[in-house]
Image (cartoon, grey):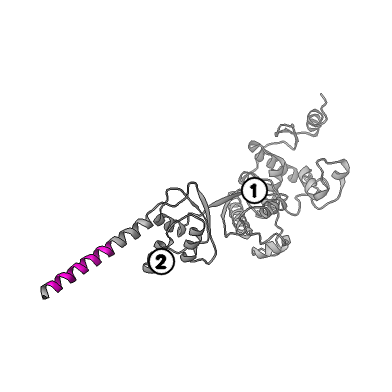
Amino acid sequence: MVKRIWAAMAVVVVLGVAGVAGGYAVWQQKLSAPLVIDEPVLYQVPSGAGFSRVIMDLEAQGVIDDSWAFLLLIKLAPDELPALRTGEYRLSPGMNGKELIALLGSNDVVTYSLTFPEGWTFEQMRDRLNVAPKLEHRTADMSDEKIMALLGREGTHPEGWFFPDTYRYHLGMSDVDILQQSLSRMERMLEEAWAERADDLTIDSPYEALIMASLIERETGAPEERREIAGVFKRRMERGMRLQTDPTVIYGMGGRYEGQITYADLREATAYNTYVIDGLPPTPIAMPGEASLEAAVNPLPGDTLYFVARGDGTHKFSRTLREHNNAVNRYIRNRD
């Protein structure tokens, strides 16, 4: 009789173990099953959300079946789960549940790009920031002064202090993050350029180098001309000649500029009109790139004092006013 009881108990234990093993196998099978999607899906992990909320949300969106398998994992092995990170994730067909969990706890978030071309103004930069998708727009209603104070540069004029480049960001970042990256990059690039400056410059500080670089940036898009234009500006300053560069006139006109400069504009006394003022304007007039920064502190030696646009993106450089007037007649006034 006793033997029969022990035999029955043994059968029960075996069946229980088999049942547990079978249940475990089913559980693991569910976790390893592919997501029920036929094309990539963009999923956003909400701020402050836990795995339970995310799993229920994914089931409601039809990304996964059998949420119980994931909820059981959360219950039985919470220490094995990665910390969730707020952001967007791209879920791919064929990805299984375990891979899904690993992805949602990784840094592999969906990123976006934002490009600020060389020669843009701070106003143009702000306009692009304000329409960038998936970016928190904290500065949209701020003045330039408040933005610079927020960035720790209170009292600094913003023009020129942001490095033109392509910046990547993800959901959860703000325009302040982009501005801080761009500002820090420009400060670093300017410091490096100034450390490699020539010995005989007519500019006396890194900030003057930044201003000069912005003039060079706005004057030419031809990389090979940047140092030569810097050389012209240097020699004109050495001789006490005014820089007479049109982009400063345009910047001083602000919103009044409509595509053309008149003789009256050239004579207008603004703080930026280098046909009227001596030396450099008070601030940069645009965002200079690396090549313009390097040109500003390493001008090309020579004897040219003038240049005029040819109309193809390059310039004709001249040594004398007579040569320059002839070039103006040829390229501007279309006279032979």
Q: Going 63% across and 51% down the picture, which residue do you hit? A: 163
Q: Look at the image and give the residue range highlighted in magenta.
A: 4-21
Q: Decide if residue 200 is on the left or right side of residue 65.
A: right
Q: Residue at x 83, y 26 (%)?
A: 335
The residue under label 1 is 116
Where disc 1 sits, the SS reads: loop
Residue 7 magenta-drawn? yes
Q: Which residue position holds label 2?
A: 74
Residue at x 46%, y 66% (from the top left corner): 52
Quarter in which the C terminus is drawn: top right
Above or below, 335 relative to 124:
above
Q: Which mark is residue 55?
A: none
- Label whose residue precedes the other's in the sequence (2 or 1): 2
| Nearer-the-camera pick, 225 or 143 | 143
Q: Could you tell me the amino acid type at mark 2?
A: Ile
Mark 1 residue type: Phe
330 magenta-colored: no
Disc 2, SS: helix
Q: Main secondary structure of the magenta part?
A: helix
CB-based contact (under 8 Å), mark 2 and mark 1:
no
